[in-house]
Image (cartoon, rainbow, N blue to C red):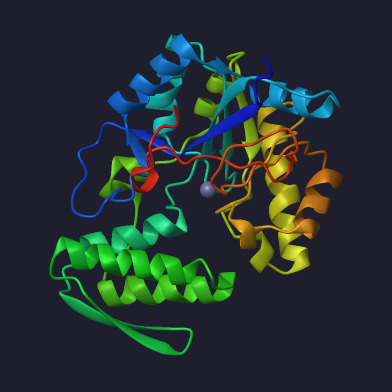
């Protein structure tokens, strides 16, 4: 029987047990802990799950691959990866890789997308106008639907802007909405610390990779800043773990968010694999720097059985 090769790389961010308020976690970036456990139980029972290093080995062999495989990956480095996901991965013996933004670790800072969510969700304002890239946008914040619309629109625009312009939008949002985002607004915003990471890294199931310093979109940076975000994050992770780092993933990871100069610099720094966040299943001919992933739960995307 000639079974077609299929590699399904699952992309998670967080696993949560927090009851969210308002528009917090409205995109389901943090998956409910019970749903996550159900998925890991299913993988353990019915599927072949590979570690990311096994994927690298598989693709470096020239021979034709067959069979269907799953890989579990996490991006960003949320605290709940340690408190909620790690015990479940161990319980079901599922290998996983965590790609982390090293500058966020040990800090009380929020990822920039979470800063936008936090401002809009917690502001007492009913309406506001903001200037983005020389255009004025007015948003109503009088109910959850309008807040969700404001969040969706501002996030979408920011993902097309340079770092400087995106930082200006966030500064202006904080001033206009009178919110200073911080982890006390929600447990979902909390980030891992190096001690959590070292504890997880002791497990044979777990690997770590870099995900830039502070989650900047690599293709929007100057060549100098792009190289810095790559080199320093790899260096910091390697120093903290006391081992060589050969894995990476691109922040945001859609088609426009990385390019051949990014890949060239990653290879020069010893990276052997960097998956994208482009949605899809991989086949025999895929490239280890352009692998597709499936964002389980995000915007209600189903688990791929
Ligand atoms: Zn990310």
Question: Which residue lies at the image location 23% right of the left edge and 65% below the top edge?
Answer: 147
- Front residue of this view, candidates 239 and 248: 248
Instruction: Give the quadrant of residue 197.
Output: top right
Instruction: Give the quadrant of residue 2.
Output: top right
Question: Which residue lies at the image location 70% right of the left edge and 35% below the top edge?
Answer: 247
Residue 124 in the figure: left or right of residue 96: left
Give the percent coordinates (x, y) of residue 241. 67, 28
Give the percent coordinates (x, y) of residue 86. 45, 21
Instruction: Give the quadrant of residue 175.
Output: bottom left
Report the quarter where the C terminus lies.
Answer: top left
Residue 194 shows up from this direction: yes
Question: Which residue lies at the image location 43% right of the left edge and 75% below the top edge?
Answer: 169
Residue 134 in the figure: left or right of residue 302: right
Report the quarter where the N terminus lies.
Answer: top right
Give the percent coordinates (x, y) of residue 257. 63, 60
- Front residue of this view, candidates 129 and 64: 64
Residue 201 in the figure: left or right of residue 245: left
Residue 112 in the figure: left or right of residue 262: left
Number of numbered labels in the structure image: 0
- Front residue of this view, candidates 117 and 10: 10
Give the percent coordinates (x, y) of residue 40. 42, 19
- Front residue of this view, candidates 158 and 173: 158
Residue 87 shows up from this direction: no
Question: Which residue lies at the image location 65% right of the left edge and 35% below the top edge?
Answer: 209
């Amino acid at each position: 029987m000639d079974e077609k090769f299929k590699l399904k790389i699952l992309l998670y961010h967080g696993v949560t047990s927090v009851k969210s308020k308002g528009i917090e976690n409205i995109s389901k970036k943090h998956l409910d802990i019970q749903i996550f456990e159900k998925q890991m139980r299913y993988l353990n029972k019915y599927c072949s799950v590979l570690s990311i290093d096994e994927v690298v080995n598989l693709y470096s062999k020239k021979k034709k691959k067959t069979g269907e495989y799953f890989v579990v990956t996490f991006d960003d480095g949320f605290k709940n990866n340690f408190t909620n996901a790690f015990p479940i991965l161990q319980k079901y013996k599922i290998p996983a890789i965590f790609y982390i933004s090293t500058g966020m670790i040990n800090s009380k800072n929020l990822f920039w997308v979470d800063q936008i969510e936090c401002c809009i969700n917690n502001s007492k304002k009913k309406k506001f106008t903001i200037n983005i890239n020389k255009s004025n946008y007015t948003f109503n914040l009088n109910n959850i639907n309008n807040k969700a619309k404001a969040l969706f629109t501002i996030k979408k625009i920011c993902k097309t802007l340079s770092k400087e312009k995106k930082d200006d939008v966030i500064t202006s949002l904080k001033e206009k909405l009178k919110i200073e985002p911080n982890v006390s607004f929600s447990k979902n915003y909390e980030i891992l610390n190096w001690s959590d990471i070292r504890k997880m890294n002791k497990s044979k199931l777990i690997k770590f990779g870099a995900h830039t310093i502070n989650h900047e979109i690599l293709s929007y940076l100057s060549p100098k800043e792009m190289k810095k975000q790559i080199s320093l994050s790899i260096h910091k992770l390697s120093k903290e773990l006391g081992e060589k780092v050969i894995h990476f993933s691109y922040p945001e990871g859609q088609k426009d968010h990385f390019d051949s100069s990014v890949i060239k610099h990653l290879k020069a720094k010893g990276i052997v694999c960097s998956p994208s966040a482009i949605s899809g299943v991989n086949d025999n001919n895929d490239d280890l720097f352009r692998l597709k992933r499936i964002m389980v739960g995000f915007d209600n995307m189903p688990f791929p059985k």
